[in-house]
Amino acid sequence: MNARNWLQRIHDLPLSRLDKPLRIMNVCGGHERTITEAGLRGVLPSEIELIPGPGCPVCVCPEEAVYRAIRLATEGGCRVVSFGDMLHVPVNAPKSEPRSLEMARPQARERGGDIQPIASPQEAVAVAHRHPDQPVVFFVAGFETTIAPIAGLIEAGLPDNLFLQMAARRTRPVVAMLLEKHDAASFDALIAPGHVASIMGADEWRFVVEKHGLPAAVAGFTPESILAAIHSVLRQQLDSAPELANCYPQVVSAEGNRRAQQLLEKHFTIADAPWRGIGSLPDSGFELASRHEAHNADKVLSLEERDYPRAGQMPPGCACAEVVLGQIRPHECPLYGKGCQPRNPVGPCMVSDEGACRIWWSAGIGRAAA
C-alpha cells in the first residue's frame, strides 16, 4: 500500500473518539528525518502529535568521552578515527583548547597525532594497517545496529595497534526510563526503531505493551512504513487493545538476528552508562569484554589525570536533553537558530543528521521565529 492510501486510512479512522491528541514518540532519528522531510506532520490529522525521541547516538554521547578522544589525539599522539558526525560534536573545554575533534585536528597533527572521519568499521582497520607504528583509536558511538558490525570486526581479529574507545549505548533502557520515571508523561504510543529491531528483534519492544499498556509498532524508514505504524497505534488506541505490531516485516522478525546477538554477547558486556544531559542509566552501555582489554583505549592508553568539570552536562542555555527526552520540541530551545545553528552548533542535537534540531532547522521549521 502506498503512502497516500495509508494517509487516507488514517483520516478515515474515528479520531473524534480520542479524548485528547495521541502523542506518538518515534524513537529513531532516521524516522524523524523521514517524517520531517516528507512533511507528514502537515498532512496528518490534528489529533496526532509526533514527538522526536532519544534515538540519536551523537546527541547522547557523553561530553567527557569526546573530550578524552580529543586529548588522546592532542596529548597522547594517537590517530583517532570516528564516524563523521562525531568530529563536530562540541564540548565545553576551556577557550584556550579545541572544542571538537574537528577543531583539534591541527593541534593533533602538530603533536604527532591525527583525527580523521571514517564511514565504516573496516576503515578503522585499514587506517591501523597503514600506520602500524602508531596507536589508532576508534572512538565508537552508536546503538545496536552500529555495534553489531563492530562485534563482527572484533570476531575477525583486530590489529595490535587498534584500540576501541567505547561510547556506545542500548536503546531499550532509555525508553524504559521514560516510561518508568516519567509515568509515560511525554508520549502515549511508541514507534520503535526498525534498524535496532532488525538486530534485537521486534520482541525487544514488547515490554512497552505488556508492562506499560501502550500501543507500539516497529517501523521502517519509508513514509509508507511509518504511516502504517501510525495507523496501527491509532487503531490500537481506539480499540483499547494495545499490541506490538511489526510494520517492517521485510527486515524485522520477532527474534531478530541471532548471529549478531551472539557476537554482541561474546565481545561486549553491558554496564551502567552516562547519557549526555540525562544521567547514568542502568545496563545501557556497551563495554569491551575483559578478554579484549589489550584493545581497550580507556584501560591501555593513559593520560594525565584531569577532572572534566562539566561531565554529563549540556552547554549553558542548551535544551538538547529535553529535546531528546521528548519534553520540548526543537524550536522551543532558547538557543535554536540563534546561538545554535548547523554551522555553529552549541548542542549535539544540531550536529547530527539524526539530531532533531538539525533535522527541523534543515527543513525550515521555526526559522521565522528564530
Image (cartoon, rainbow, N blue to C red):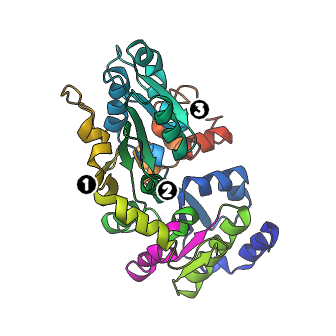
N-term mark: 2 or 1: 2
Q: Residue 355: percent from the left, percent from the top?
A: 54, 45
Locate residue 226: give its quadrant: bottom right
Number of other residues with Cα within 10 Å of mark 3, as a class: few under 14, some 14 to 19, many 20 or more: few
**213 magenta-colored:** yes
Q: Residue 293: percent from the left, percent from the top?
A: 27, 48
N-term mark: 3 or 1: 1
Q: CA distance from mark 3 to mark 1?
A: 49 Å
Whether residue 164 sits left or right of residue 117 in the image: it is left
- Which amino acid lies under the numbered mark 3 shown in the image of this protein? Ala
Find residue 370 and name its label: 3
N-term mark: 3 or 2: 2
Number of other residues with Cα within 10 Å of mark 1, as a class: few under 14, some 14 to 19, many 20 or more: few
Q: Contact (CB < 8 A) between labels 2 and 1?
A: no
- Which amino acid lies under the numbered mark 1 shown in the image of this protein? Ser
**Residue pointed to by mark 1:** 290
- Which amino acid lies under the numbered mark 2 shown in the image of this protein? Gly
Q: CA distance from mark 2 to mark 1?
A: 33 Å
Residue at point 30%, 51% (across, down): 292
Q: Which residues are magenta?
A: 199-220
Locate residue 231: give its quadrant: bottom right
Nearer the observer, 294 or 260 = 294
Q: CA distance from mark 3 to mark 2?
A: 22 Å
**320 magenta-colored:** no
Of badges 2 and 1, the one in the foreground is 1
Determine the secondary structure under disc 2. strand
